[in-house]
Image (tube, grey):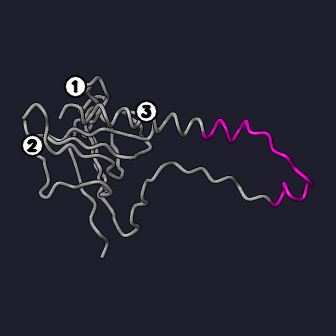
Amino acid sequence: MRLGWQIVLVLAVLSGVLVAAVLLADGCAERVVESDARVENAPPPVIERGERKPRPPEQRVEPSRCPPEVPECAETEGEIFYVEAVDPDGDGDAHFVIWDSQSITLPGLTAIDLEKSMRPDPLPGPGDLVSAAGPVQTGSYGQSQIHALEFHVGKPVR
């Protein structure tokens, strides 16, 4: 099961390289223009970023907050991309990788380590919205991740 984190990290790096290549190709591409009017009325280019499903608009999550006494604490919120429900070392914690703007682990992704005593039941899965806050620590593969002291799972808005 330790291979799971390696696969996620490789996929994330490859996704970042793909996005960079698309952006570079779009910026460097030579464009043939027949008239100035066509350039002024052209729609902006569309850049696809993979097969990420949009988060349902009716899902909301309570923000997680860092305690003031915790050094190097980070707060994040995002949609779950990957779940490691069974920890390889057997201590019962869960790991999540979320899409977010904090980019603590990799560009656009943050890993969250959630100890056994904080595991929600049922465990959230890909597409669920979560928030977490805690110190940024180094994981077993050398990745930066949030060791969650506070964790919330999104709920449908009624």
- Residue at the location (90% across, 59% down)? 37
Q: Specify whether 22 is left or right of 76.
A: right
Residue of label 1: 140
Image location of residue 139, percent across then percent down: 24, 27
How far apart are labels 3 and 2 at the CA level? Answer: 28 Å
- Three-letter residue code for mark 1: Ser
Q: Would you say the residues marked 1 and 2 are in contact, meaning their CB atoms lie under 8 Å apart? A: no
Drawn side of residue 101 relative to residue 134, left or right:
right
Tell me whether circle 3 and circle 2 mark residues in contact (CB < 8 Å): no
Residue at (81% x, 61% y) in the render: 41
Which image quarter holds the C terminus? bottom left
Mark 1: few/some/many CA within 10 Å (<14, 14-19, 20+) = few
Where is residue 75, by image quadrant? top left
- Of the image marks 1 and 2, the number of the one nearer the N terminus: 2
The overriding secondary structure of the stretch rendered in magenta is helix
| Residue at position x 28%, y 49% in the image | 64
Q: Is residue 134 magenta?
A: no
